[in-house]
Image: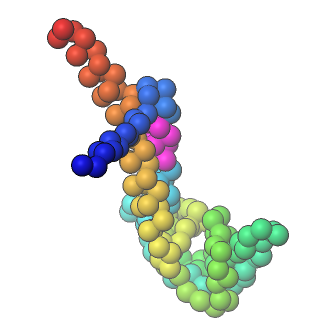
Amino acid sequence: MGVRERIVVNHPGPVLGLLLLVGGGLTIGFGIRAIEDRSPYPGGLSATGRVVEVVDRSDGDSQDYVARYEFTTADGHRVTITDPGGSSHRPAIGSSVGLSYRAGDPQDAHVVSGRSNGPMWLLFGLGGLFALIGLDGALVRPLRRVLRRTRR
């Protein structure tokens, strides 16, 4: 007969659990905010923007390009905005993107197409996972210990 091995899984204690819970909650918040930043404004207007300039903000470690877009509002005003985010790939001058803006503040337009929300949903999901693990360590396991002691 062979020796049976027992796999031991260490669960986070209350302090680590609390840190994971807080960190997971913050990560969920960042994920939601990032997804909202890429969604159309509620009641906003849409336009097609054209890349008119690309600024290279790359440093020695990473590539970062910031695009300037030009679009025409519904009432015929021409507006130029700078994408506050940036991208690791250089957009082509003249390429088109979907924009969303508020009628009273077209300078606050943002890109809503041409980008994937996949990384933002991943951020949201990882935050949820961390929060669940933290909830287990910070609340569930300590409560189980207390309940076991009171039953004895």
Q: Quadrant of residue 71?
A: bottom right
Q: Quadrant of residue 81?
A: bottom right
Could you tell whether 35 is left or right of 67 in the image?
left
| Coordinates of residue 151 in the picture (x, y in percent) | 17, 11
Please tell me which residue is depicted at 55% across the width and 68% down the height of the picture.
110
Q: Is residue 17 above or below residue 67?
A: above
Quadrant location, the C terminus: top left
Residue furthest to the right: 60
The part of the chain drawn in magenta is 20-27
Q: Main secondary structure of the magenta part?
A: helix
The residue nearer to you, when weighing 31 against 99, is 31
Task: Tell me, yes or no, if residue 113 can be seen here.
Answer: yes
The residue nearer to you, when weighing 57 against 84, is 57
Residue 98 among those drawn in magenta: no
Task: Tell me, yes or no, if residue 76 can be seen here.
Answer: no
Could you tell whether 71 is left or right of 139 in the image?
right
| Coordinates of residue 19 in the picture (x, y in percent) | 50, 33
